[in-house]
Every structure is written in C-alpha cells, then in structure tokens.
Image (cartoon, rainbow, N blue to C red):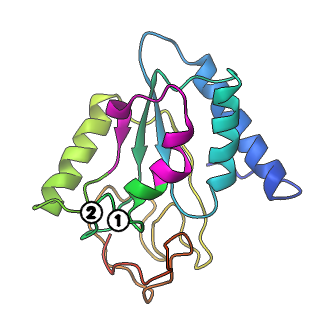
Amino acid sequence: MRVVIQENYEKMCKWAANYIAAKINAHPADKPFVLGLPTGSSPIGVYRELARMNHAGEVSFANVVTFNMDEYLGLPREHDQSYWYFMHDNFFNHLVDMKPENINILNGMCADPEAECAAYEAKIASYGGIDLFMGGIGVDGHLAFNEPFTSLTSRTGVIPRRCPPRRCPWASPPSPTPRRC
C-alpha cells in the first residue's frame, strides 16, 4: 500500500486519476487491465476526472475489467442506495468505451450470498487477480470497506455492519443503509 498526501481533495483526485490512467495506458493490450474500485464519497472526484480523461481520449476503458469491492445484501441494483446504482450514476455511465460485460459488482439480491462471494473470488482469480485497487478511508476508520477491526487480508464475504445504519448522502431522500454487506 502506498499513501500519497496532496494539498487538497481536487489535487488528490487528479493525482489518483492520472496514476490510474498511466497504469491502464502502460498495460499490455493482449490482456485486460483489472481494476478494483470503491464506492462512497472519497472516489467521486477521481471518477469525474477519469471520465473527463476518457472523453478527452487520454485513457480508454475498452480493455478494462472492473471489480467493485462491496454491495449491500437485500438491495436490487436499481435501488438508489445500491452500489451498482452508485457506480453507474457516478462513473460507468460517464465513460465512452466501458463495456457493460466488463463491469463486475456483487449481486445484492442473490439467493446464496456465500456462493455469490465464492464465484466473485473465482472470477477475480480467472483474470489473474487485480492489477490495481483503489481504496478509500471512511470517517469511522474503515479501509476499503473493511470495517474497523476486520483483517486487511480478508476476502469477499458477508459481513455485518458494526456501526449503526448511517444515512446515505447520495440516496434521495437520504435513508438508513442495510445492516449487512
């Protein structure tokens, strides 16, 4: 893990977007670049800058496969608090060449969450792992959706939310989030 400190949020977002774009652009074209992505408020500026760069022709997502790190159990993807909805609203819908089949987000409505998690891990492994993962740090200290006191080496799985349900600022109107993800 690398920690980079910038003067302000805008500069941090531009630095992160440029770093991600450089990694994508330098990747061999004969296999996809696998990018791990977070949700929440931290990455929104990075997503906006990557979308701007994509529209300007500075980076292409045509050969990028994404895996999001989280989803809430019990929310359909069309729900405005689901991370599927969040990612499309804040990033994927703003890219000119992202292939829908290359977007991977856990199914919050699956019948068997443990099987869904195992299949997700297997799909990541089928690509040879993740080339670059962007994580965020939450106000409660969670790192990349690992709740406080969970292992940073944990894999995809169902976890109870340790904190009380929080209000999602991107939901309209804001409402409590589910207790399991």
Which residue in the structure is indicated by mark 2? 76
Where 111 sits versus 68, above or below? below
- Which residues, given as a range, are shown in magenta? 87-105
Is any atom of residue 153 visible in this view? no
Tell me the quarter of the picture where residue 103 sits: top left
Residue at 46 percent across and 48 percent down: it is 88
Instruction: Judge from the rendering whether residue 97 lies leftward or rightward of residue 58; answer left or right.
Output: left
What's under tag 2, amino acid-wise? Pro
Where 65 sits versus 10, above or below? above
Instruction: Judge from the rendering whether residue 94 lies leftward or rightward of residue 107; answer left or right.
Output: right
Whole-percent x, y for residue 112 in the image? 11, 61
Tell me the quarter of the picture where residue 31 sits: top left
The dot on residue 173 is none
Q: Nearer the viewer, residue 34 or 178?
A: 178
Membership of 103 in magenta stretch: yes
Tell me the quarter of the picture where residue 16 sits: top right
Residue at 37 percent across and 80 percent down: it is 161
What's under tag 1, amino acid-wise? His
Membership of 145 in magenta stretch: no
Q: Nearer the viewer, residue 79 or 111?
A: 79
Q: Residue furthest front?
A: 172
Whole-percent x, y for residue 4 in the image? 76, 50
The dot on residue 79 is 1
Residue at 47 percent across and 30 percent down: it is 98
Kindly state the secondary structure of the residue where label 2 is placed.
loop
Whole-percent x, y for residue 170 in the image? 54, 69
The quadrant of the image that shows the C terminus is bottom left
